[in-house]
Every structure is written in structure tokens, then in C-alpha cells.
Image: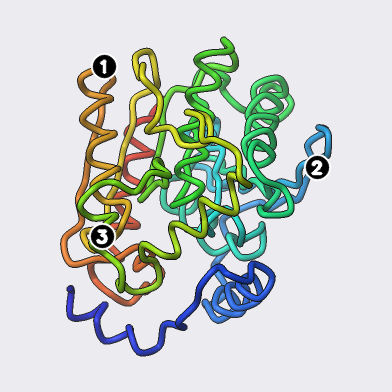
Amino acid sequence: MDPELEAFIPLFPRTDLADPVAARGRFFELAAAVPAPDTTDLDVEDRTVPADPAVPVRIYRPRRADRVKRSQAVLVWLHGGGFVMGDLDTEHPWATLIANGSGVTVISVGYRLAPENPFPAALDDAYAVLRWTAEHAAALGIDPERIAVGGHSAGGGLAAAVSLRARDERGPAICFQLLNQPGLDDRQETWSARTFTNTPWFNRDKAAASWRHYLGGRPATPYAAPARAEDLSGLPPAYIATAELCPHRDDNIAYALRLLRAGVSVELHQWPGTFHGSQAILSAEVSQRQNAELSAALRRALAG
């Protein structure tokens, strides 16, 4: 493990997802401890997307003159939290980081959480926001040909599922997927999923609980677990980032290879010495490189 990250392990809370309400409280406390982000160069606006039910979103628009053209591109961003934790407030520092780093407009989605709202609630919310973004592109000042989806962990899995659904339903055109340590496969059959039982913050048991809450006893489909999709052709180009000490690692690498074999352009970055969510340790040099690379990948993909 990267020594800068290892030094923080004693400070990470030992959490599980057996009690989702308690887990949300601990997650909120952890997120609240992160220093307030710098929004000086952003216009931040809370909106509600009409749907059944309505979906809260937070829009981050870069206001610097040198970024006006780039800000016409948009990233529909989906937070992590194992499908059971997280909201617009806990994601605020990370959405700000991406908007500031990339210069593109970011729409952060407050999707419904499991187990109270199991699959497909979160996917329906994310897809509703994608459609709303495309349909209101002119009012939002967005280029409809430069719409990307992305997310971290469970949010990365949702972004991959949104891409599949948009392809299958001939929905809004997505030009890029930004998938950071995405949760893609409920089966947990890979070496990393079976082996990483005691890794910091996220491990096999926590992943299993996450999928159990999200699926709610229903069989998994490709829209719930995108790795189950048999056909990955026709999907948007992707940037996939993995953490070495993460149960998702091998699923992520396998998905990247399958996308490549299906003719989809992929950039795959495996970060050595890192664990799931370690990018939150902002003082570590490797975290700074990870976060900068996410923004750089977005800039490259959405350059207009």
C-alpha cells in the first residue's frame, strides 16, 4: 500500500452496511469532516428534475471566461455509497473538484437510495436526469453532442447502466463514460472480489451487503449489474480507473477488456498501492494524481 495512504488507515471508521440508516449517519459525518470546497469559480444551483418522483440535482457551472466553451459540455455525475449512502451534500466536495478540475458543467444527481428504494429506482432517477439534460440543453447552455455520464463506485455502476439503457432505448446520445472504481458485478467471482475481505473502507462483505440492499431479493439484470450484459457494442468510449486493493478491481479490468473487444474505445488506469475510496485522502500524492487524471480524461473527451 502507498505509505501516505497507509498512515490514514487507523483514522478510517470500521463500518458495515447491515444497518443502512446508521451507515448513512457515519458516512455523513465522514463527508462533513472534509474541508469545504472552493466554489469561487463556480455557479452552483440546486434544481429539481420533473420525474416520478422528482429528482434533486445540483448543477456546477464554471464561470471563468477561459472555460466558457468547455463548460458547454456536461457530465451527469452519480455519487458512490454502495447504493445505500450519499446525497448531494456528501458529494458536494467531489462534484466541485471535478467541475473545477475539468472546466465542464457537472450535474450531480441525488438519486433514491436502497434498501427503501431498490433497483431500478436509482437507475430510473439517473436516466430521468440524463433525458432532462438532453431535452433542456438549450436552456441549460449545454451542447447536446457533448453529454457524458460518470460516477464513483456504485455511481460508476449506475453510469455504466445508464449507458446501456440509453443505447438499448435509443435515448439521449452519450459521448463518454467516466467510471471510477465502478460497481459492475453482483456475482463477486473474480480473484479480487473473493480475496479482499479486510481491505480499508470497502471489502467483500460490504460489497455483498451493498448488492443485497440494491437488488432487494430480485434477480440481477444487466441494468442492475452491467457486467452481466452480453453485448457491449455501441457503447460510448470509456475511462475506467481501478484501485489495486479494491474488490471491484478485477471486475473493472474485465469490463474494460470486454468493451475493447466489442469495439469500444477505452482508457484503463490501474492505480497501484491504492484502495477503494482512498482518493478522499487529498494530501496523498497519489490521490492528487488520481483526481487530476479524472478531470484530465474528462477534458480530453469533451474538448469542443
For mark 3, give the secondary structure.
helix
Q: On the picture, is 43 further left or further right than 287?
A: right
Tell me which amino acid carries mark 3: Arg
The residue that mark 2 highlights is: 48
Is 284 above or below relative to 151? below
| Front of the two marks 1 and 2 | 1
The answer to whether 127 is drawn above or below residue 119 in the figure is above
- Horizontal side of residue 258 vs 76, given as left or right: left
Mark toward the start of the polypeptide (1 vs 2): 2
Residue type of the residue flagged with mark 2: Thr
- Residue at point 54%, 22% (across, down): 165
**To which residue does mark 3 refer?**
289
Front label number (3 vs 1): 1
Question: Residue 281 location, x and y as percent?
Answer: 37, 74
Question: Would you place residue 231 above or below residue 46 in this image?
Answer: above
Q: Nearer the viewer, residue 29 or 208?
A: 208
Closest to the camera, between mark 2 and mark 3, is 2
For the residues labelled 2 and 3, the Cα–Cα distance comes to 34 Å
